[in-house]
């Protein structure tokens, strides 16, 4: 028997938040106590006076030791006050000078923020080798960001792509000196020589951890010589997204409506205000659920609206953080009675997330398959449905190329119960 389900609209609304200032982690002034020569970690408790903290740590893995900063002749690295390399645009910088026991050793520089940060950017200088014909060491850095549940790679560009365009090789989230014999060489990393400097930019990605791996590219000596890099100040804005909402759904339970939602991460989250409307214009707060505050794990919430009246009911969440900034969720549509019809998707075209509002005759698990017109599978997810009205949110369409796609919904017996085409913008 073919089961009939109805899918209706998902509406995305704008957030209203106070603007966030550009903050700067200054190696020379943000840490308390200040970074002393040879220190392996420090804490910055109040960056730019915004009560945003950051813990920075440096370590060697695989064997080796830190040496006095190259060019300073005495300031034990990691060092800030003894750093001699220039990082463009930075009022201060940290310099690390490791002497690895073997070419598989590496240095890790970690930054952990107490809040999610966006628009994160900084520069790394002195990515070089001993000279154009030497293989004693080959500087390489690999940078990643994370928010606890997702990993992000920054965009890396050359600060000076003109003077010696082949000096650096950039691949994904990694940059290294050109290891080809006769190419690149040593850079002074001073005001007039920045061939070994890169720009690192995470863009709009919301992260709270940055990891920089400093090691040797393949081909270096097994016991590399002393080498060094310098990292400049880190600029960022405090994320205005207190909550990453991955699912928001609702269904009828007898005369009541049960709403459920899941968060992937929370940062300074205070509460979820539940609002109801019958016309998508006039909204009424009907309840509130306390939020976790901080979390990097999936958290599940629910709210029951007891015996609401109306043929069609609309629900949304007002996600409020501790600074009273807020953002609205998508809208869940609950019909008052069974309405039969064909599958509908919204928005269509879709950019990043697709809303599916549907009625199921029973509680069941269904599979959602997304294919292109040639039949190639590009995305697949399983979703739990409840008896009654349901609302499904499917995210992460941003990596799928533009075109026309087909959504097919199958029950546990692999029977097709609904399908529809949509456009990816």
Image: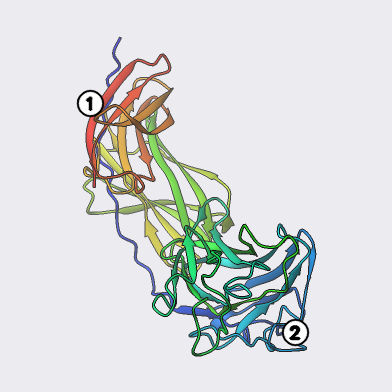
Residue at mark 1: 339
Instruction: Name the secondary structure under disc 2.
Output: loop
Q: Nearer the viewer, mark 1 or mark 2?
A: 2
Count of numbered tags: 2
Q: Is residue 186 above or below residue 140?
A: below
Left or right side of 112 for 279: left
Q: Earlier in the sequence, mark 1 or mark 2?
A: 2
Dividing the picture into quadrants, the one containing residue 65 is: bottom right
Q: Residue at x 58, y 53 (%)?
A: 296
Instruction: Name the secondary structure under disc 1.
Output: loop
Specify whether residue 416 is in view. yes
Percent across and percent down for residue 143 are: 55, 62
Percent across and percent down for residue 193 are: 50, 85
Q: Which mark is residue 367?
A: none
> Which quadrant: the N terminus?
top left
Looking at the picture, the colour scheme in use is rainbow
Q: Residue at x 75, y 84 (%)?
A: 36
Camera-side residue: 80 or 252?
A: 80
Dividing the picture into quadrants, the one containing residue 63 is: bottom right
* Residues at marks 1 and 2, CA–CA distance in whole angstroms: 70 Å
Do the residues under discs 1 and 2 have CB atoms within 8 angstroms? no
Camera-side residue: 35 or 218?
A: 218
Residue at mark 2: 36
Q: Residue at x 71, y 69 (%)?
A: 58
Q: Residue furthest top?
A: 1
Percent across and percent down for residue 272 are: 45, 54
Camera-side residue: 89 or 175?
A: 175
Percent across and percent down for residue 175 are: 52, 65
Specify whether residue 254 is in view. no
Dividing the picture into quadrants, the one containing residue 29 is: bottom right
């Amino acid at each position: 028997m073919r089961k009939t389900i109805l899918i209706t609209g998902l509406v995305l609304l704008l957030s209203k938040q106070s603007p966030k200032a550009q903050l700067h982690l200054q190696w020379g002034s943000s840490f308390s106590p200040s970074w002393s020569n040879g220190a392996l970690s420090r804490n910055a408790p109040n960056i730019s006076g915004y009560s945003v903290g950051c813990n920075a740590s440096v370590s060697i893995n695989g064997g080796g030791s830190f040496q006095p900063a190259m060019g300073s002749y005495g300031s034990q690295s990691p060092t800030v006050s003894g750093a001699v390399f220039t990082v463009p645009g930075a009022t201060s910088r940290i310099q690390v000078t490791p002497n690895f026991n073997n070419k598989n050793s590496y240095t890790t520089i970690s930054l952990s923020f107490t809040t999610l940060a966006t628009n994160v950017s900084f520069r790394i200088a002195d990515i070089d080798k001993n000279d154009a014909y030497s293989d004693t060491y080959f500087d390489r850095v690999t940078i990643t960001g994370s928010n606890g549940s997702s990993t992000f790679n920054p965009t890396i560009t050359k600060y000076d792509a003109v003077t010696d365009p082949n000096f650096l090789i950039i691949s994904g989230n990694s940059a290294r000196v050109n290891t080809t014999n006769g190419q690149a060489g040593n850079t002074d990393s001073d005001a007039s020589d920045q061939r070994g400097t890169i720009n690192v930019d995470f863009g709009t990605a919301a992260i709270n951890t940055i990891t920089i791996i400093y090691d040797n590219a393949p081909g270096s000596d097994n016991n590399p010589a002393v080498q060094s890099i310098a990292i400049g100040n880190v600029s960022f804005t405090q994320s205005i997204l207190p909550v990453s909402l991955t699912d928001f759904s609702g269904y009828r339970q007898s005369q009541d409506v049960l709403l459920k939602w899941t968060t992937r991460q929370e940062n300074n989250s205070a509460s979820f205000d539940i609002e109801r409307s019958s016309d998508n214009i006039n909204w009424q707060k009907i309840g509130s659920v306390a939020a976790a505050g901080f979390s990097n794990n999936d958290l599940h919430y629910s709210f029951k609206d007891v015996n609401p009246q109306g043929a069609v009911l609309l629900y949304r969440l007002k996600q409020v953080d501790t600074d009273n900034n807020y953002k609205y969720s998508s809208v869940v549509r609950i019909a008052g009675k069974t309405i039969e019809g064909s599958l509908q998707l919204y928005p269509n075209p879709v950019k990043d997330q697709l809303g599916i509002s549907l009625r199921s005759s029973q509680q069941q698990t269904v599979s959602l398959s997304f294919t292109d017109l040639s039949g190639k599978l590009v995305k697949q997810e399983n979703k739990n449905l409840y008896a009654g009205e349901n609302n499904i949110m499917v995210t992460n369409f941003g990596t799928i190329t533009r075109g026309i796609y087909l959504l097919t919904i199958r029950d546990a017996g692999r029977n097709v119960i609904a399908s529809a085409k949509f456009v990816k913008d």
